[in-house]
Image (cartoon, rainbow, N blue to C red):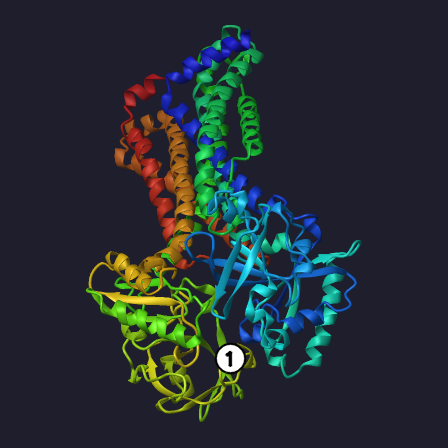
Amino acid sequence: MAFLRDLKIAVRSLARTPALWITVALTLALGIGANAAIFSVVRTVLLRPLANRDEDKLLYIRQSAPGLGVENATFSVPEIQDIGRGLKTIKSLGTFSALDVTIVGLGTPREIHGGVVDGNYFEVMGLHPVLGRLLTPADDGPNAPGAAVLTYRFWKTSLHSDPSVLGKTIRLGSVVGARSAVIVGVLEPSVPYPVETEVIANVVTSPHHLSATMVTGREHRMTEVFARLAPGAELESARSELAATYAGMVAGHPEVYKPEDHFRIDVTRMHDQINSRANTILWVLFAAAALLFVIACSNVANLVLARTVRRESELAVRTALGATTAALRRSLLAESIVLCGSGALAALMIAAPMVSVLGRYASRFSVRADGLTLDFSLVWFGIGLALVAAVALAFVPRLPSADVSHGFGLNSGGTRVASGSSRRLRIFAVTQITASFLLLAGAGALMRTLFVLEKTQSPFDTANVLALNLPVMTYGRTPQQISEFYREVQRRVSALPGVEHASSSFSVPWRDAQALNISFLFAVDGAKRENGLDNLRARFRSVSPSYFDTLGMPMLEGRDFKDSDREGAERVVIVSQSLAQKLFPGQTALNRELRWTDGVMKFIGISTEPRRIVGVVPDFDDENIIPSPAMAVYQPIDQEGWSGRLFVRTQGDPYTLVPAITRAIREMAADQPVERASTLEDIRAEVLTPNRLNAIVFGGFASVALLISVVGVAGVLAFSVSGRTREFGIRMALGAHPRSILGDVLSEGLLIAGIGVTAGVVVGFALARLTARYVAEVQLPGTLVFIGSAVAILLAAVIASAVPAARAARVNPVEALRTE
């Protein structure tokens, strides 16, 4: 009952200082809420087990060629057969090939992300159906009927969980042909990897996978490989066995695996592979939240300790009147519990909205963040820490003993205690400044990166160029009819009012990552050799005539493609400026002969015959926002290559023409999908979204941390001023100018900030170097970022010092001395 009375008194006492109560509650709420939200994301995305059975046995096998600049080269069918032969540590292999397909038979025809798998895939992945069945080895082979499995998300969102989809026949079309398939099942909810797919079908549904070029082409790589450990086998033993097998394969085919390409194989657990993209950003975010928690705790300790010290005279009076030490501790504990408890309750209210915001942020890096909910385990942990802190803060201050409660001993005793407390307050303030500097420097680095990205000018027009997905519909059409269809589309769209140019290609800048990643080896007669090598690698692009006019890119030399550049005519190409300058410095590249020398050409139907260079265009880096020298070769679509993307340059707002463009195309083919209409400017903005989110989230953390630190420094100086009132009174009585008192207090605030910034620089460098050993992406912020962060901290310290300094400068010497 006595403690309940103390709680009531504490509430009444704190109600007289609402600023303190609100500041402590909000500070704790931000610290606990942010950590609960971040931990919910980290636990869901990085730590939660996969839906896959025995996930610790599930492996991802990756082939790379650093010499070619290829981080993930995927595998060809012969390579998969070689590495899978005679393995003892691997129970079985499963394969997956990503393939964008046009699906017909489930409502409006549309282009979706699909996958082609072998019969072992689902067993290796350890997944189950929620409806029907999954694919098995019985679905393998060229004579098997077409079968497809829908992913759970596609079934639920697009088909509204319709159970009648089982048994329906659909048509799956791509640039290499179309096949029918029967829907046999719906996959359980699981992490889609390596790409988010809607339909997963057996090999027979892809004509290309049945072709001899795919089955026999060792360099025709387009398949991901997954594996399941054999019973009793360990990851390291599997890694060693695969490395030995792979070494034998490489040695047996020196014409394919050249020493300078440095082909190698790696094996990781599936869980680690899925999280590889999100790992760094989420752990850094978690570290930022932890820093914010440290700042919050330091600030709360500052505020509560300062309040306790200010009440030492009151506590001394209560002691003189007979209050026991236990009673005083109980009253301090009641106040601490009210302060920390209200902060913990506020944390509950803000944690859920923060999880929602961070979930949308994390979904940019991992599909596992979908449907994220608050993990209450850390909320309760944070509340527990708050209560522990409340107890600690109640027992840290020294209490006056009965023998100091006589006469003027009250003041002197309080001064002695205040002196020790002041040192602790400064330590807490320096800790806050150090952590704030680290957050501010990190946010500054992200802001600087975003600024550079935003200010980088694209070499082509982005505002008035509309890009649309126009996937190839091959069913019932010959290759000649498909080419004629795209030519007619361009002709009709070009004739629409408000359209300046229309052209086509097989990839949209920045958006079609898989297509943009295509590059091949080539050679040019008479070209300057690089490191003694005849062959170089260039990006492969197939475009229609007027493509460069549509994007607003001028020809630097030569001519554009013409309608006469078709199959049967002289083979021609256009090259980028970097390629021309690198191979023919001080000369012209026009009329030189270029030949594709990549071994994969014979598997994808592109000729290795010589092609005459007829034009040179400016470098056009369609993969990166910050452009780099782009070695690129452009071929006319009507000679060789693929289409599927339409570009329209308009005079006014491009979006107003989308309905007219769609009508013109649908008049030619009613079932032709016309999708994802967007200007190149908006596509660029979408690509920048993760960078913006990074800057906003970390900037938010840094801003909150800086605000809390300002409050902390102001509290320390306010406490210092109250403890030095007598000193200031004496100095002013002896003739000291108020400006000197003002400068003294401001200097004290700057000193605290300076020590904190110095510690932050040292700790920041040490942490960056330590982290860089394990995370290659980590880079130190630039000098400007460090200087800017330090200036921001010091300015904040001046602002925080202003009010206490002004109060010190207004001390009345008579009143100050009278208190003694």
Q: Looking at this view, is 45 or 410 the one in front? A: 45
Horizontal side of residue 123 vs 529, given as left or right: right
- Residue ID at (46%, 18%): 312
Residue nearer the viewer, 225 or 526: 225
Q: Quadrant of residue 525?
A: bottom left
Q: Please tell me in which quadrant of the rendered image residue 66 appears.
A: bottom right
**Could you tell me residue 28's position as x and y percent?**
47, 30
Q: Position of residue 642 (x, y in %)?
A: 43, 73
Figure check: 330 above or below 549: above
Side of 144 where 11 appears, left or right: left
Residue 718 sits above or below residue 659 on the image: above
Q: Secondary structure at mark 1?
A: loop
- How many numbered discs, if any? 1
Residue hosting label 1: 605
Label 1 crowding class (10 Å Cα cut-off): few <14, some 14-19, many 20+?
few
Q: Dividing the image into 4 quarters, which one contains the N terminus?
A: top right
**Up-down relation of residue 224 to residue 786 (above or below):** below
| Residue visible at 56% across and 29% down in the picture | 380
The three-letter code of the residue at mark 1 reads: Gly
Q: Tell me where residue 352 appears, x and y as whole percent.
A: 47, 33
Q: Quadrant of residue 570?
A: bottom left
Q: Percent x, y for residue 87?
A: 77, 65
